[in-house]
Image (cartoon, rainbow, N blue to C red):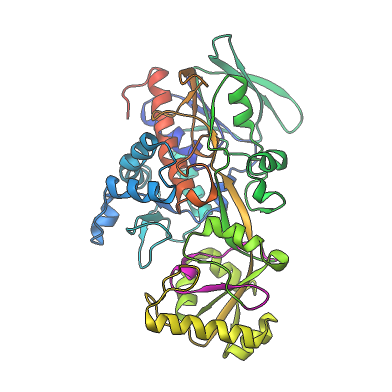
Amino acid sequence: MPVLIVGAGACGLSAALAVRDQGLDVLVLERDARPSGNTALSSGMIPACGTRFQRAKNVLDSAEIMVADIQNKNKGLADRDLVAKVAALSGSTVEWLADSHGVPIELVDGFLYPGHSKARMHAPPGRTGAELMVALLNAARNKSVDLMTSARVTEVFANEDGRVLGVRVERPDCAEEEIGCTTLILACNGFGANREMVHEYIPEMTGATYFGHAGNKGDAILWGTQLGAALGDMGAYQGHGSVAIPHGILITWALMMEGGIQVNADGKRFSNELEGYSEQAVAVLQQPGQLVWDIYDQRMHELGMKFEDYRVANGAGAILTARSAEELAKLTNLPFDSLSMTLDHCNELAEKHASDSFGRAFGANPVLQPPYYAVRVSGALFHTQGGLKIDVEARVLRTDGTRLPNLFAAGGAARGLSGPGAAGYLSGNGLLSAVVLGRIAGQSAAVLAGGRTSL
């Protein structure tokens, strides 16, 4: 097989589409009976700059602005060359998915996600990763991508020089087979479901709820290091500070960006909610019982209803409604005096366009007013952002900086764009890495295997 891909999420399918565009055969190996992965659990948001979707809404954006936003969030600690390459190809990649492969995509405007200076989130109309997965699978089917499901890769074979020769696959009935390849792309995400690796590399999330795919055990990292690959930014990850409990449903952070607040069991705020939803996971987990409440009003509820996950949460009874602060306190079992004081203080700051002791600036949005809405949430680990070191062609690098002969990695299997920790995660970095680096990996692997041109 010219190109073999492990993992059929957004990364693996984007890579496969890029290979087929080069006219080469490709086989995607997926451990599950039905591909889903972390992509299906996401909100389906792909940040991209300079797209026709942005231009249609008069959003002026560029790779330079996007790089500055990404690097500002990670404090300049990510690989700048990799960031620059991904940002430069982000717009053309989103348009490629939409125009060449029929993936329904639109610009998400009306608010900005934390750290983004421009409206650049692109997503399917329902704003869910599950919808994105369906579209990518349809695109793969239309391009005659060979997809083998229920196929768990257990071993990668290579010669003494580190050249990958093939893989061993185990089927549900324990039958095994070996598949050879010219090039191999690892697109099987990170290690969020591996408790030992989480404890080793991101100890602050030890014991945290993992809101990701159960198959993300760090296999790609294990195989790569066995071949002599280097690792990078292993402490990086995407957390999220707003997963409805006990429903296990993601509540969009757009509610916070548009004026919502989080309060703990004492009815008090405890952080700057606008810093970012990833690092907010740790702040939430430090609160009593590891539970807090998202508090917002009718305007934000109507915004939330544009998101499929939020509609599901609302239908499941996770969203509470109160006609007054007193009723809100009763429904949430929060102390009324403290909650009322918190609401009054936030409204006073908004009226004065002032900042609080946590550094959050108020005044960009209207004051909170009844009816109030609330949802009980906790923090969670979504996916890891550290992994195999790669270059701008998604080639896996050895510890001495040289390339392994024919091994590629992207998405959660590779070092991402967020630097070394949670605070460096910019909204959408996960799918940005998956889709753009997936396409780069597919294109690069196809060229190495005898395809037509490079990206």
Residue at image point 54% right, 39% down: 412
Q: Quadrant of the C terminus?
A: top left
Using the image as rendered, state which of residue 118 and residue 434 is in the foreground: 118
Q: Is 199 left, or right, of 164 in this rendering?
A: right
- Residue 160 drawn at (x, y percent): 58, 9
Magenta-colored stretch includes residue 265: yes
Residue at image point 62% right, 49% down: 212
Q: Is residue 110 above or below residue 168?
A: below
Q: Is residue 35 above or below residue 304?
A: above
Using the image as rendered, state which of residue 300 and residue 139 is in the foreground: 300
Numbered range of the magenta stretch: 246-267
Q: Is 16 left, or right, of 174 in this rendering?
A: left
- Residue 381 drawn at (x, y percent): 62, 52
Q: Residue furthest front?
A: 357
Q: Is residue 19 visible?
A: no
Magenta-colored stretch includes residue 65: no
Q: Residue furthest right?
A: 174
Using the image as rendered, state which of residue 349 and residue 178 is in the foreground: 349
- Residue 166 drawn at (x, y percent): 58, 18
Q: Quadrant of residue 320?
A: bottom right
Q: Is residue 215 visible?
A: yes
Q: Is 327 left, or right, of 46 in this rendering?
A: right
- Residue 20 drawn at (x, y percent): 41, 30
Residue at image point 71% right, 23% down: 176
